[in-house]
Each structure stands twice: as structure tokens, then as C-alpha cells.
Image (cartoon, helix red, strand yellow):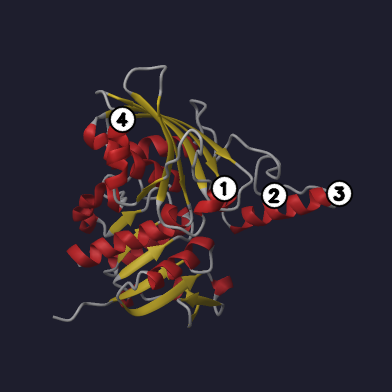
Amino acid sequence: MAKRSFNVAVVGATGNVGRAMLQVLAEREFPIKNLYALASSRSVGQKVSYGEDAVLTVENLEHFDFKKADIVLSSPGAKVSAVFAPRAAAAGAVVIDNTSHFRMDKDVPLVVPEVNAEALKDFAKKRIIANPNCSTIQLVVALKPLHDIAPISRVVVSTYQSVSGAGKDAMDELFAQCRNTFVNQEIERNVFQKQIAFNVIPQIDVFMEDGYTKEEWKMRVETKKILDADIEVSATCVRVPVFVGHAEAVTIEFDAPISVEQARAALKKAPGIELVEGTRAEPDYMTPKECATYDPVYVSRLRKDPTTPNALSMWIVADNVRKGAALNSVQIAEVLAKKYL
């Protein structure tokens, strides 16, 4: 029996994530019959690459007939998704949305395939599937194999998030501020609340009434929805002057004893994870610069927390544009294509 191929539309195809989606689709040889690159009217006619040789011409999202699409990979911004995603779903497509708009909708699965692929069985309720926040994705991929052997009660995480998480304009702002610092020119600030070059900013998204930012709230509620509603999460999310790659310092408290050796064995076997190990004499760990353009979630500096019973600490790093957005979306599409479509 011939393998089925699918008509796929990529929305936001000219953005960082959209371009990465096209790249990942080609790399993983997703079975595509027809491929459409969509964006706003100001991008119509632009060319985007698909694979090594193919070039697509960007079409107008506003005028696209979604009856031509089986699967839509979407990363255009939350306000745009709110309008077009239901329209695409009503036309019969399945939308895998990378924005925050649908994540906490009870009828929309919030999926990381290595963690809760079974949630996709409910995709037909709205024909929309949400891709989690990039920081949440790498966190829950690392938590899942540990939660399976010793239930997690609490997670305390501090993130070190690259500027690519805020889009191309944010990356341009970091570059310009670095350049202007060295040539002694005025530092302009348009994207971030404070200067990002040679600085760190303990605010991502807006502040909420309890003093946490919305990014920190996302990590808490999304982890509960994806992994376990009983897990408590306290997050501090920090923007750092790195172009690509998010890092997280994480302490995990368990309801039962778990040794470093048990955790190491579980992480080694887990899908989507690469455990980076060293010795005291020759320590090894992953950094954002080293993880850029690679797929795994890297875990290193695994150790016992001596300050509280049944707790471990670790360092988690991943490429936020790939695993934190594009790759996770394509992996969802792969599960859909194999099991549900």
C-alpha cells in the first residue's frame, strides 16, 4: 500500500520559526504532496527555501483557500492565529499552532510528542493542536522520564532565554546594540524593556498581579496541562544576550527517593534527550551556542540537591527555534499522519 502524502501549508513562512519549519519538513522527509508558504500581504511574492534546491513563492494568508490543505503548521503571532486557525479548521485542515492563543483551551491538545502524544486523540474537537511555549517544551521533555520513576511534586526553574524567542526584530536589536557599543554610538531600544546587549533582563512578557510574568505563568500552567496537574512550578524567566538557544537551571523535588544513578539511567533511555556527562576532573556540559541547529534536549550537571529530601538539580539546554518550535510542530504532524489522518 502506497504511503499517503499530505498537502501542507506553513503560515508565517518568512519568520524565523516558519523558515525553520520548512527546513525541518525537508530534513525529516515529511510526506508532502503540495506545500504552500503563507504570510501577510507585505511578504507576498518573497521566496523561501525548502530543502537544498526547492524555492517557494509566498502566498497571501488572507486569501488562501484552506480546503487545499490537510495540515497547517502555524507561527504567525497569536492575534493572527486567533482569526485564521478556526477558519482553516472549519475548511477541514488540522492546524498545529505555535502561538500562545489556544494553549489553555480545554478542547485543544497541548502536545510534546515525547511526553504526551496520546493527547492527540482529541484533536478532532477543534482540529487545532497547540505547540507549547519553547521553555516549557525542553523542561517537560527532561521531566517526563524522571516523573515516570518517581512522582514530581515541585519544580523550581530559572531560564536563560535567547533573543530569538522574541523574533527577528529582537535578534536585530541585540546585534545593533553590540555593534553600537563597540563604535561608541547611541544604544537604541525598541523591542526590550532595557538594554539587552551585555545585560540580562528578568522580564519576559508582561507582569501579572502576583508579580510573576506571563512567561513564568505559561511555564507553570503548561507543565501542569502537559505532564501532571499536581506538579507545582515556580519559574523566573530571564532574557539573555544570546542569539539562539534557551538554558534552564532546574531543581526538582520528588515524592519518593530517587538517586542520581536512577535519574541518569532514565534520561539516557528517554526519547529526545541527550545526556551530557563528564567527570570532576573533566566536567562537560552543553551551552546554548553548542546546541544551536541541533534537535535534542541536552541535560547536564545532574546532581543531588543536599538542601531538601528527594531532590535533584540539572542544567537543560535546547535550540528554542528547532525543538522549542519548528521541530516539535513537525513531530506532532508526524504522529498525526501516522496514527490519526
SS for callout 2: loop
Which residue is the site of mark 2? 190
Which-is-in-front pick, marks 3 and 2? 3
Name the residue at 28% across, 40% down.
265
Q: Is residue 319 left or right of residue 341?
A: right
Question: Is residue 166 something that shows in the picture?
Answer: yes
Query: Few, some or many C-alpha atoms within 10 Å of disc 3 (few <14, some 14-19, many ≥20)?
Result: few
Which-is-in-front pick, marks 4 and 2? 4
SS for callout 1: loop
Question: Is residue 109 something that shows in the picture?
Answer: no
Q: Is residue 311 left or right of residue 15?
A: left
Which residue is the site of mark 1? 162
Q: In which quarter of the view is residue 47 placed?
A: bottom right
Give the camera-side residue of 73 and 164: 164
| Amino acid type at image mark 1 | Ser
Tell me if label 4 and label 1 are in contact, CB under 8 Å.
no
Q: CA distance from mark 1 to mark 3?
A: 24 Å
Which residue is the site of mark 3? 184
Name the residue at 23% across, 37% down.
148
Which-is-in-front pick, marks 1 and 2? 1
Q: In which quarter of the view is residue 64 placed?
A: bottom left
| Amino acid type at image mark 4 | Ile
Q: Is residue 28 above or below residue 147?
A: below
Which residue is the site of mark 4? 231
Give the camera-side residue of 189 and 243: 243
Query: Few, some or many C-alpha atoms within 10 Å of disc 4 (few <14, some 14-19, many ≥20)?
Result: some
SS for callout 4: loop
